Amino acid sequence: MSQIRAQTAAMQVHDRLRYEIVTAALPPRAPLSEQDLTARFGVSRTPIREALLKLAEEGLVDIYPQHGSFVAPIRLTDVYDAQFVRESLECAAIALAAEKIDAEQSRQLSAVLDRQNVFHKVGDNDRFFDADEEMHAVLMAIAGHAQVWRQVESAKAQMDRVRHLTVRRPLKRNAVLTEHQAIIDRVLKRDAPGAVEALRTHLRGVFQSVDILVAENEAFFATEAEAMPPPRGRMAGLRR
């Protein structure tokens, strides 16, 4: 039972830190002191270490043995790899969704877009982002591959760090809505090739976003020396 509780605690710590890193609440290179995290979450060091190791495996934390753990900078190679995964899986799925969609699913997609438009108008970036995620997940479910969305979510953490920064821009949110409308219109018309092309254009927008963000938020991104992550290290290497 104690092992189960420890595993649950590690998962909770991981999920919270992951959210804070992806949303930039914890900025790149912020120190992650094991002692501070133990006090913050009210758990022992074991779940803290397990959470940090898992985050390191996901490329969100850099562990320097004998020096400590830090939020990883955004590495462009990771962003581009994530975009490749999304485009490969989601474009295959949306072609199926355009063939399978029924009347109730059509209403569901339109309702998601309506909610996202409301969140855009009131400037609720977090709920706008959540509605964005929901639309893509619904399309995957309509295609008959709802569980694949979990794989997409796991692969796109670095891409989401970029998306959370760009969604703060009203012009970007407006562009996303326009692109989402084009995607949904083609799905509702059962235009599979058109839906694939609209989605591909939408997902590749991250390349332009990166160019803008690197110019404006250079500190968020890895320098040439940081392009490759450090050794992940063992538990003993985590900051105490």
Image (cartoon, rainbow, N blue to C red):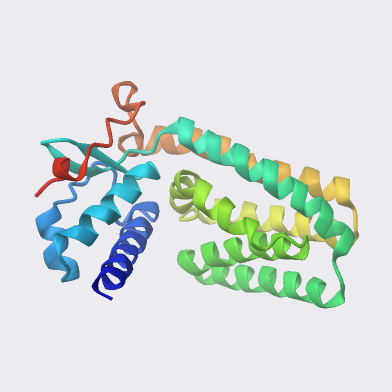
Question: Looking at the image, which residue is at 57% across and 58% down?
Answer: 150
Quick one: which residue is furthest to the front in this view? 1
Pick the front one: 82 or 57: 57
Pick the residue in front: 153 or 120. Answer: 153
Which residue corresponds to the image point at 46% horizontal and 49% vertical from the top-left? 157
Residue at the image position 82 percent from the left and 51 percent from the top: 95
Q: Is residue 52 rendered to the left or right of residue 196?
A: left
Q: Is residue 26 visible?
A: no
User: Does the image show residue 192?
Assistant: yes
Q: Is residue 101 left or right of residue 174?
A: right
Identified at 61% across, 37% down, the residue is: 84
Q: Nearer the viewer, residue 190 or 117?
A: 190
Residue 147 placement: quadrant: bottom right
- In the depicted view, which residue is nearer to us: 110 or 217? 110
Q: Tell me if 213 is positioned left or right of 180 in this view.
A: left
Image coordinates of residue 75 in percent, x first then y, are: 40, 34
For the N terminus, which image quadrant? bottom left
Horizontally, residue 68 falls left or right of residue 98, namely left
Check the image and report above or below for 227 versus 84: above
Counting the numbered discs, the total is 0
Quarter of the figure with residue 110:
bottom right
| Residue 144 locus on image (x, y percent) | 76, 62
Expressed as whole percent of the image width and height from the top left, the position of residue 39 reads 11, 66
Residue 25, image x, y percentages: 31, 57
